[in-house]
Image (spheres, rainbow, N blue to C red):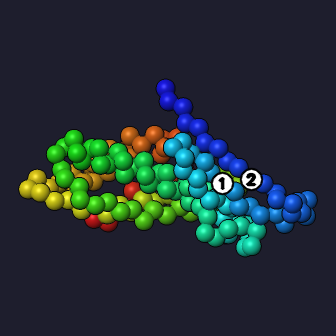
């Protein structure tokens, strides 16, 4: 079993707080020293109380699903002898009401566009099968209730 740890930091920095007009800007700290500016989404908390240039939890949720799928796809393609030259996914997450009428990321759609090279290239059916297997293996996707879809574009 693996354990993953992160640190989230925020400070009021002397600003008012109980009026709910405090900055939602904060930091995500990861192993290896990565420090990511984070904030509530400007779609949830209006500017200037949020930070548009920072990563918000909703974006992080979507990108973690996309990244997990990609890593599995690349591994599967390599094991099958296919050479992947590039992979791009313009993933989209939708915030809406769930079955309990609460706000949730109700579905995430991945749009992977994969370019292959070499003499041994997969057929469209093989690409679809690799995406399906990657989806089945992605433990992030298996960890959430959100409907995660994969609609390859190439």
Question: Where residue 153 appears, x then y in whole percent?
Answer: 32, 66
Q: State the quadrant of the C terminus.
A: bottom left
Is 150 on the left or on the right of 82, as rendered?
Answer: right
- Dividing the picture into quadrants, the one containing residue 121 is bottom left
User: Are the residues flagged by discs 2 and 1 in contact, CB closer than 8 Å?
Assistant: yes
Which element type, helix, strand or loop, lies under badge 2? loop
* Residue ID at (62%, 59%): 37
Real-space Cα separation, disc 2 to disc 1, in angstroms: 7 Å
Question: Where residue 100 appears, x then y in whole percent?
Answer: 69, 51
Which element type, helix, strand or loop, lies under badge 1? strand
Residue on which disc 2 sits: 10
- Dividing the picture into quadrants, the one containing residue 48 is bottom right
Residue on which disc 1 sits: 27
Question: Can I make out residue 78 in this image?
Answer: yes
* Residue ID at (36%, 47%): 71
* Residue ID at (52%, 56%): 62
Q: Residue furthest bottom?
A: 47
17 versus 100 height, above or below: below
* Badge 2: residue crowd in 10 Å (few <14, some 14–19, many ≥20): few
Question: Can I make out residue 97 in this image?
Answer: no
Q: Residue furthest top?
A: 1
Is 17 on the left or on the right of 118, as rendered?
Answer: right
* Badge 1: residue crowd in 10 Å (few <14, some 14–19, many ≥20): some
Question: Where residue 51 appears, x then y in whole percent?
Answer: 67, 68
Is 114 on the left or on the right of 6, as rendered?
Answer: left
- Dividing the picture into quadrants, the one containing residue 40 is bottom right
Q: Earlier in the sequence, mark 2 or mark 1?
A: 2
Is 105 on the left or on the right of 109, as rendered?
Answer: right
Question: Where residue 35 appears, x then y in whole percent?
Answer: 58, 53
* Residue ID at (8%, 56%): 119
Q: Residue furthest front?
A: 33
């Amino acid at each position: 079993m693996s354990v993953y740890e992160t640190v989230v930091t925020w400070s009021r920095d002397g600003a008012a707080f109980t009026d709910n007009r405090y900055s939602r800007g904060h930091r995500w700290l990861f192993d290896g020293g990565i420090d990511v500016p984070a904030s509530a989404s400007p779609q949830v908390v209006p500017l200037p109380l949020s930070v548009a240039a920072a990563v918000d939890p909703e974006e992080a949720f979507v990108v973690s699903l996309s990244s997990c799928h990609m890593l599995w796809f690349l591994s599967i393609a390599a094991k099958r002898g296919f050479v992947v030259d590039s992979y791009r996914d313009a993933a989209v997450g939708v915030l809406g009401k769930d079955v309990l009428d609460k706000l949730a990321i109700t579905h995430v759609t991945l749009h992977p566009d994969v370019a292959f090279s070499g003499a041994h290239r997969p057929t469209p059916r093989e690409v679809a099968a690799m995406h399906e297997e990657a989806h089945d293996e992605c433990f992030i996707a298996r960890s959430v209730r959100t409907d995660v879809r994969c609609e390859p574009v190439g």
